[in-house]
Amino acid sequence: MNHHSPTVAPAPSSGANVGQETFVLNLGPQHPATHGVLRLKLTMDGEYILRAEPVCGYVHRMHEKMGENRTWAQFLPNTSRIDYLSAMHYTHAYVAVVERAAQIQVPRRAEFVRVITSELNRISSHLLWLGTFLLDLGAFTPFLYAFQDREQILDLLERVAGARLTYCYYRFGGLCADVDAEFLSRTRDFVGYMRRRLDLYHKLVTENVIVRKRLVGIGVVDAEMCRRYGATGPVLRGAGVAYDVRRAEPYSVYPELDFKIPTYPEGDCMARYLVRMEEIEQSLRIVEQALDLIPEGPIQAQVPRALKPPPGDTCMAVEAARGRFMVRVVSDGSEVPYRIKLRTPSFANLSLFEEASRGLLLPDALALMGSLDLVIPDIDR
Amino acid sequence: MWLRVQRAARSGRQPAGRLALRRAAALRSASALEVLRANREGLSMVEPARLLMFLLGSLVFVGLNGAYLVWAERKLAARFQRRLGPTEVGPAGLLQPVADLIKLLAKQSLVPPGADAVLFRLAPALVIAPALVAFAVLPFGPELTARPMPLGLLLVLAFGSINVMALLLAGWASRNKYAIIGAARVVSQNVAYEIPLLLVVITLLMITGTMDLNEIVRQQAGGFWHWNLFRITANPLMPVSFVIFFICLLAEANRAPFDMAEAESELVAGAFTEYAGIRFGLFFLAEYANVLVGCSLATALFFGGWQSPWGVGSGVGWFLLKLYLLVFTVMWVRWTFPRIQFYGLLNLSWKILIPISLGTLLLTSLVLKWVRP
């Protein structure tokens, strides 16, 4: 039976001498598309990738081990430096797990401020991803648009946290400082501003014919693959699974807030792109609601200066910008944690790259990698 | 007399007018031959002087344009991106190209170990030379062409293709995998895009009946509705042909969204990965020279060259204005679109542009044969 083969670009296996005509391309650790120091050893047949072997560890800083030889509070600054683009979420997970272990009740105002700043941080992280992702596709201009909008968030967060990237704003039982009325009003202004900008992005980028050609149907990651590799966050939601830690394991005041979990079943780069764009919208909604609901009151609970959580094993996960970030702390009742285990989303999301990139063209594989939104220190820890 | 012939050609008396046009063109080329012969016999001093003037003129033009188009592109990109661009060196950063040039010249010209040193050094020269040659026949003004030739268009297109070989050499000689991938992309890209480009040019040639660029511009005299872009009586799809020509121009000059040779986020710097200093600068200059040649060609072929849009006051100014408007568009496209995927690029050419341009070719020949006998 002679079937017509579908007219797609020739697959790498169509050549008679596969395995003889391959070469190894070393992509990174210094490469414009790896955004940091990720290294990929690509076995290529022409421009087709037969095997992509990620080599990580170039920025391994032993965060987990560092946690074992300093006090509970001294580990706080480390949490902003694991995934430096969603520092608020990481700090949130760590302070929340310690609060859970030491049974500290956080004041409501502090929880609302945490939600507002966390969601602002999520937007800024997604904006940075938007810019760099499009840069990977060869579009330079949206990068600067996104960075300009991100700048507004950084200004807002700098106002309350004093830092623009590694905030370390949350403390055990509360916050480092209260927010003022101007922060709240400027945040409200920002919500309106960002909605208008999102419309602009959709007109500029989402509807661009080349962007669609580059993203639709490229780099499909299905729910089954996500399950096998433990992928979470926008990657999983882009595969059609409505899993969000804020809903699955509710924490802080998220149960009181109304937001949707955007999912797209296609699992391609476009789905992940749309999920993140919609998440920006949902984050704006959350911020808006939290601004309406935020009560007056204290921002800090009474916490002993030398914190000694009772012996035990505690876990806490948050929805970081890249997916599920979990901290597991083991306390032996002393001032120093016995063990701090970090479960970072980028590591799981990277591990599916090898399977998902098999047979892709180099530019498509880089689009896939961009759509996974990897942060290298988050992989290496 | 010439104008009268042409006006006759434009007016209703087509057959007689067109005949007169042909005869005049034949006369003109005959007289050009005579001038050539006279030059060779008696005026041997004029030719070297002309050559020198052309070399100096085109080098200065390309050099200045290359330098200041980089400046203009940086400024323009900055404006598109809501920033300022170069401001530090000189007023509004106007001396930035000079500073860049000094930096490039001061850098060591490395040849990577294991590279083919001869080809590696030859490639930058080979990439810039054809672009310079093309300037010999570009019709800047009624009297401003270095060497008007009956086959000028052919010369531009022929030398335009050498550029590809130079990039291939650069990629091959570098002994770098990224460079070779970049070079391989350039070759398949340029082969793919030369076909629709030439098909559009052939369509145009059937209408103009000459390959002399000056002659083509002269035929478009008298108001913008005489420009080839609007000659829909001969080819109803002329604007489409121009769009195809413009896309091919971008692809041939390796400009974004077709910058496969460089593809910064994929291939680091593609074929130029191993180049540093002024050799890299030459590739850069050649890119701008190619954009200039392409846009000049588009101006002459579609926008009436140095003809003014309302028929009076034609001159070199109009040519430059149209040229730079097109160059602006090229830059505009670059800073607006992402890079197209490589197979998407080839599919665009083979599956869309070539069939359409073949269709317009057929349509034009039918129109010329039957509708306008």
Image (cartoon, grey):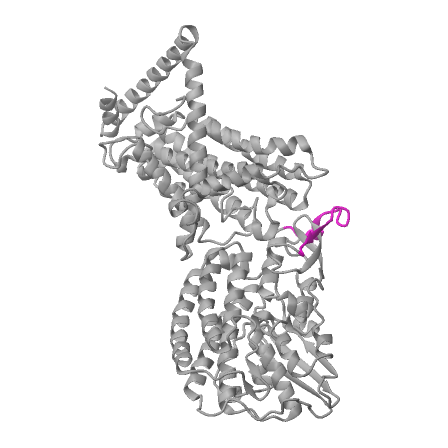
Magenta highlight range: A10-29
Q: Which quarter of the picture shows residue A76?
A: bottom right
Residue A332 at x, y percent in the picture: 75, 89
Query: Would residue A132 be found to the left or right of residue B96 on screen?
Result: right
Residue B160 at x, y percent in the picture: 50, 32
Q: What residue is rendered at 39% in x and 22% in y?
A: B148
- Quadrant holding the C terminus of chain B: top left
Q: What residue is rendered at 61% in x and 65% in y?
A: A220
Residue A23 within the segment the image draws in magenta:
yes
Q: Using the image as rendered, state which of residue B307 and residue B55 is in the foreground.
A: B55
Q: What residue is rendered at 43% in x and 65% in y?
A: A202
Where is A261 relative to B21, above or below? below
User: Which residue occupies the extreme right position in the image?
Assistant: A20
Q: Using the image as rendered, state which of residue A355 and residue A5 is in the foreground.
A: A355
Residue A64 at x, y percent in the picture: 71, 76
User: Which residue occupies the extreme front position in the image?
Assistant: A305
Tell me the chief SS of the magenta region: loop
